[in-house]
Image (cartoon, rainbow, N blue to C red):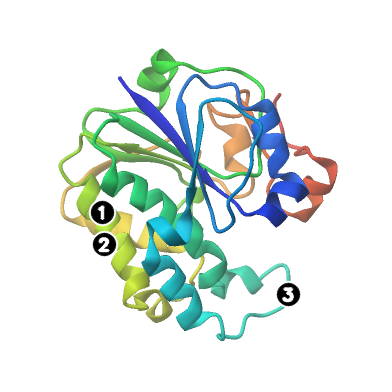
């Protein structure tokens, strides 16, 4: 299998915490980084792509919707912040749509710190499923999935269609018809539509709330330092590494 990894961040986030991603990244997979700013990352075997140059629809979405009000409440404000999370959706789906060279694509948030190296055998055993379109960290039907880690089977017949439909949710501003506008809610919404059509997906979460990544097979591999408290510590209290 030929596996690739993609993430996205800008200069501000790189300085705040993203530098740790690249200091610790130790997976033997091709890595693409999308950024609104052209980052100069001191790391070998990385391709940095300009988000707006590669995906002009992303910039159009931002300009069209940046005026929408978003609550300052750190507990709930992100739920309606479609613009904040659109960069990730456009970057990941662009990699799916434009890349035919890879068999699997790992999409991972830039607020990740790596510890254990994984290889193709690990992915085959724990992440990939020939019959599944995507692999995700589910937290049960009552809560949206943890989408700091997503895996796509690039040989699945529906994966490109899924990515195109995800982009249409933003191109047409359809996400604002949904209850919530953050990326996890939108990934789940479109994933469930495909499951209703018979598409199989692999859930590596335990169906419980909170920091599901730390409890998953990925817990000993890397730490997802999501949220301001974990970023301040540069470590998750739930980490198993």
Q: Quadrant of the C terminus?
A: top right
Which of labels 1 and 3 is toward the front?
1
Where residue 120 appears, as percent x and y from the top left, is 40, 17
Helix, strand or loop status at disc 1: helix
Furthest-top residue in this view = 121
Residues at discs 2 and 1 in contact (Cβ within 8 Å): yes
Please identify the quarter of the rendering in which residue 156 is found: top left
Which of labels 2 and 3 is toward the front?
2
Gap between marks 2 and 3 measured at Cα: 30 Å
Residue underneath mark 1? 162
Q: Is residue 42 left or right of residue 158?
A: right
Helix, strand or loop status at disc 2: helix
Gap between marks 2 and 1 measured at Cα: 5 Å
Dot 3 alpha-carbon crowd within 10 angstroms: few under 14, some 14 to 19, many 20 or more: few
Q: How many marks?
A: 3
Q: Earlier in the sequence, mark 1 or mark 3?
A: 3
Helix, strand or loop status at disc 3: loop
Q: Earlier in the sequence, mark 2 or mark 3?
A: 3
Where residue 235 appears, as percent x and y from the top left, is 77, 37
Q: Residue at x 59, y 21 (%)?
A: 26
Q: Is residue 170 left or right of residue 168?
A: right
Q: Residue at x 38, y 81 (%)?
A: 177
Please identify the quarter of the rendering in which residue 80 is found: bottom right
Where residue 159 appears, as percent x and y from the top left, is 24, 46
Q: Is residue 184 left or right of residue 127?
A: right
What number is the disc on residue 165? 2
Q: Residue at x 31, y 54 (%)?
A: 191
Residue underneath mark 3? 73
Residue 112 visible: yes
């Amino acid at each position: 299998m030929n596996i690739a990894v993609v993430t996205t961040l800008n200069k501000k986030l790189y300085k705040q915490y993203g530098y740790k991603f690249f200091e610790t990244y130790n997976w033997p997979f091709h890595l693409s980084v999308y950024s609104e700013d052209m980052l100069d990352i001191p790391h070998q075997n990385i391709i940095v792509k300009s988000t707006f140059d590669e995906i002009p629809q992303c910039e159009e979405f931002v300009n069209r919707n940046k005026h929408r009000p978003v609550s300052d409440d750190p507990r709930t404000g992100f739920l309606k912040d479609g613009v904040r999370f659109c960069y990730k959706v456009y970057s990941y789906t662009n990699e799916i749509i434009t890349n035919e060279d890879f068999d699997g694509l790992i999409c991972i948030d830039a607020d990740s710190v790596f510890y254990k190296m994984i290889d193709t055998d690990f992915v085959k055993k724990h992440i990939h499923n020939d019959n599944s379109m995507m692999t995700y960290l589910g937290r049960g039907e009552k809560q949206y999935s943890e989408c700091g880690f997503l895996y796509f089977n690039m040989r699945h017949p529906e994966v490109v269609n899924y990515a195109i439909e995800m982009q249409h949710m933003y191109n047409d501003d359809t996400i604002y018809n949904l209850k919530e506008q953050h990326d996890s809610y939108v990934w789940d919404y479109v994933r469930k539509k495909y499951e209703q059509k018979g598409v199989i997906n692999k859930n590596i979460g335990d169906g419980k709330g909170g920091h599901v990544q730390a409890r998953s097979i990925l817990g000993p591999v890397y730490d997802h330092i999501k949220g301001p408290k974990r970023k301040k510590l540069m470590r998750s209290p739930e980490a198993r590494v």
